Amino acid sequence: MGSNKDRARLLNITMYISLIHLTFDFGTILVSPVYFASQIASGYESNDSQPILGMILNVKSREEDRFVLGLIFGYSVEIMSTISVFLGILQFCLINRCFVYATMVEQGRFKKFKVYDNVVRF
């Protein structure tokens, strides 16, 4: 909404919403890998349908199999959560750039730069 209307006030509200979303993403990166890894390692999630994975990873027993699967799944959830946080930071930076542009256009400071005369308003 803020970038469609190209107004500084709406973009400022969008920036704050993006920061709140980023805070929840940081909370997710702390909790979710541990939760999912413990679910698999404790046996709540059954992995009996994958006997080939035990042969590939060279594990000796079901407990080792569950532990290794939990470890791998925890790391993969952590990597995906980290990517999500980086995308949230990128989103915040892009909204901030749009906010600076909209503020300059509303205040009329954008017109005195001759380099930016041909910039199309989005």
Image (cartoon, rainbow, N blue to C red):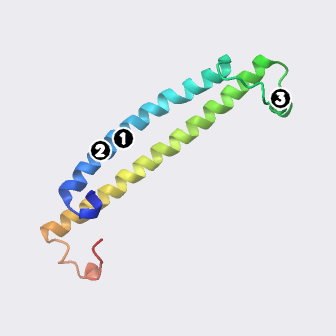
Q: In this view, does 57 lie above or below 87?
A: above
Q: In which quarter of the image is residue 76?
A: top right
> Which element carries disc 2, helix, strand or loop?
helix
- In this orientation, which residue lies closer to the viewer: 97 or 122? 122
- In this orientation, which residue lies closer to the viewer: 101 or 1? 1
- In this orientation, which residue lies closer to the viewer: 86 or 36? 36
Q: In this view, does 73 lie above or below 121?
A: above
Residue drawn at the location 21% of the way across and 55% of the way down:
10
Residue linked to disc 1:
21
Say which amino acid is labelled 2: Ile
Give whichever of discs 3 and 2 has the lower sequence position.
Answer: 2
Q: Where is residue 92 in the image (x, y as percent from the top left)?
A: 35, 51
Residues at marks 3 and 1, CA–CA distance in whole angstroms: 40 Å
Locate residue 48 relative to residue 118 in the image: left or right. Answer: right
Residue linked to disc 2:
17
Residue drawn at the location 28% of the way across and 81% of the way down:
115
Residue drawn at the location 48% of the way across and 33% of the way down:
29
Quadrant where the image shows the C terminus: bottom left
Residue linked to disc 3:
51
Whether pointer 1 and pointer 2 mark residues with C-beta atoms closer than 8 Å, the reply is yes
> Which element carries disc 3, helix, strand or loop?
helix
Give whichever of discs 3 and 1 has the lower sequence position.
Answer: 1
Which mark is nearer the camera, 3 or 1? 3
Which mark is nearer the camera, 3 or 2? 3
